[in-house]
Image (cartoon, grey):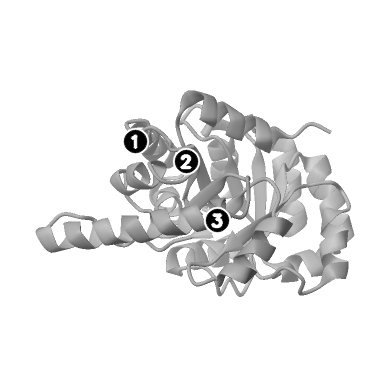
Amino acid sequence: MSDPLAARWAAARSRRTAALIPYITAGFPNAAATRALLAGAADAGADILELGIPWSDPVADGPVIQASTFASLQGGTTLGGVLDLLADARPSVPVVLFSYINPILAFGAKRFAARAREAGASAVLVTDLPVGADPAVEAELRSSGLPFVRLVAPTTADARLAAIAAASEGFVYLIARLGVTGRGNGERGAAERVQTQLAERVAAVRAVTPLPVAVGFGISEPSQARDVAGIADGVVIGSALVERMKSGGAEPALRWLREVRAAMDTVPSPA
């Protein structure tokens, strides 16, 4: 079975650049915009895509993605509809299905895994299924052979970090909230501290796994993406992209992705 994720990470390494990983909420602001983003992401510089499955209680997300999730549900988006949309779109970059566990359980975990593989997904990330919490459900989700990407929080203890990294496949997603723009002298100093802490955290993850490390949450400017690209293997862009889709659909989002890609390409990846 081929591994599109591994191929994409290898391609990014060969370019000496970090992978750009946009997140979008499926069905927001409508299905047509989702299809357009999926179709245009590769040309805009994306290496991997995260496709969010909307759910009614997205407690781990910020207000922008929460609002997009509610709007998508109000528009009639369902998990089955997301899989049908993905199967129809067949984007040229690997897609990670990003979901909470509840909609998957309602759909049936084994059925979901099989349908996700058939639809062309390259991996699954479940935000609220901690390692070891439900081995039976994990086994069902792995039954189709899709890689299971894991999240690491900024406060995860070292022993737990090793367990998460050992259970992860495809890559490890490191959560980091980056709200500093670095415009003033004090902000520049704060930005430097954030970068130092992030570099230390990425190094801690790399110490326990050979998998690529992608960093996301709070990256809202091309300059922030550039800074993270000099530290991590991949950069996840979510809320800032979803906000642009809210205001104009796929086109402004794709234009902005090109800006982010250009900024990231000004620094070599440390990988």
Give the SS element for disc 3.
helix
Sooner in the amino-acid sequence: mark 3 or mark 1: 3
Residue topped by disc 2: 250
Compare residues 30 and 264 and report the one nearer the observer: 264
**What is the total number of numbered labels drawn onto the structure image?**
3
For badge 1, the amino acid type reads Glu
Residue 259: numbered disc: 1
Residue topped by disc 3: 205
Residue at image position (52%, 49%) is: 214
Give the SS element for disc 2.
helix
Residue at image position (70%, 42%) is: 86
In the rendered structure, the answer to whether residue 40 lies left or right of residue 127 reads left
Quarter of the image where the N terminus is located: top right
Mark 2: few, some, or many residues within 10 Å (few <14, many ≥20)?
many
Q: Position of residue 84 (x, y in %)?
A: 76, 45
For badge 3, the amino acid type reads Val
Residue 45 shows up from this direction:
yes
Q: Position of residue 56 (x, y in %)?
A: 63, 72
